[in-house]
Amino acid sequence: MNETADRVLGGCRIAVLLATAAIQLGLSLTRLDGAPGRIAFATLAVVLALAAWWVLRWKPVPWPVALAGAIVVLAASAVASWALPPDQHLGDEDWASGLAGWHLLVLLLDRPAVAMAALVLQMTLTFVRQVGAAPTDRGEIGSVMIAGLSVLAFQAATLALITVVNRRAGEAAEASAERDRQAHRKALAEEREADQRSRFAGQLGATLPLLAGLADRTLDPRDDAVRQRCALAATQLRRLFAENDDVPDPLLHEVSACVDLAERRGLTVTLAVSGEAAPVPTSVRRELTGPLMTALAAARTQARVSVLRADDEIRVAAITDGEPGPTANGSGSVDVEWHALGERSWMEAKWRSRPN
């Protein structure tokens, strides 16, 4: 149950507790007569004080305490009620029959079905006592039953009203939370869209001089350096498109996009993946795939790409027959290494989700 519903129900518990205490002290104390009645009154007062320990701290009465307390309340009510003469049942002197129901509500308010069953049982015991007493006329029995049912109906209506209010409060809080979640998702979507537009604009801005150079023939497409720049620009755009796709494994999807474009250029590329998919922030995925794009753009005929995912570490590596890239140690949270292996180059980008 959400926090709002908890607070509403906690307020209802306190209200019922205070009403029960007022009824017991204000309306029942002056009607005590005889030792059984005084013992029952004291017992009910102890049960109410015990329940107040949790209720006044906005907590429900624990189930074992509530169950034991309900049994004690029923017993005390039976003792006080059955000690009265039959003609006083549910009359002014029978304070216990009506009071016990409020104690049951205090104890069992968080369990409406059990509370209703306890109320019915408590009033049934009173009726059984009346029917089993000395013979009375039907009119007297009918009056007693009407009085008892009136008390039961009022207490049951109170229980039903609290249950409905609590349910409505929970539904309202859930609706409010859902609106907040939708607003949050909308804000994230707008932020992501703005970031994508910015990155597309930046990538196109970096590609336009290359396209302009090819158009005005200041760049020779037969030059290896120019072809490498074109391959890198195409791979960057392809990875950027893949970044916006909704897939279960975004990192592998973006790596596969880079590999796919390399294969379209005629490279022989093998891709090995190890480990289960793990959530990787978008910015980290960009840093992991950036060196891979450089390595594939520099490759001449073949490349071997691997993605290794452990518990707290992700590595993207490539062995190609191209020249090594920059020897920088990466940027941000990703470490990048380049090494020459004879006529080949080896690159590895490594990210730790829990840095040492």
Image (tube, helix red, strand yellow):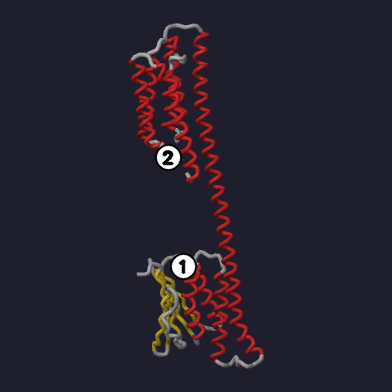
Task: Estimate the x, y position of residue 134 in percent, counting from the top left.
Answer: 42, 7
Report crowding for label 2: few under 14, some 14 to 19, many 20 or more residues within 10 A (C-alpha). Answer: some
Q: Nearer the viewer, residue 112 or 191?
A: 191
Task: Estimate the x, y position of residue 216 in percent, counting from the top left.
Answer: 66, 91
Q: Which quadrant of the view contains residue 56? A: top left
Q: Amino acid at mark 2?
A: Trp
Report crowding for label 1: few under 14, some 14 to 19, many 20 or more residues within 10 A (C-alpha). Answer: some
Vertical arrangement, residue 258 with respect to residue 353, above or below: below
Task: Estimate the x, y position of residue 147 in percent, counting from the top left.
Answer: 51, 17
Q: For numbered disc 1, what is the local secondary structure? A: loop
Q: Is residue 264 left or right of residue 272?
A: right
Mark sitting on residue 58:
2
User: In front of the other: label 2 or label 1?
Assistant: 2
Say which residue appears at 42% left-offset and 79% top-offset: 336
The tally of labels here is: 2
Q: For numbered disc 2, what is the local secondary structure? A: loop
Location of the C terminus (image quadrant)? bottom left
Task: Estimate the x, y position of residue 185 in percent, counting from the top left.
Answer: 56, 59
Give the spatial CA distance, label 2 vs label 1: 41 Å
Say which residue appears at 42% left-offset and 40% top-offset: 58
Residue 178 visible to the viewer: yes
Say which residue appears at 58% left-offset and 82% top-offset: 206
Q: Is residue 189 left or right of residue 41?
A: right
Disc with the residue nearer the chain's start (2 vs 1)? 2
Q: Nearer the viewer, residue 244 or 327?
A: 327
Mark sitting on residue 280:
1
Q: Amino acid at mark 1?
A: Val
Mark sitting on residue 230:
none
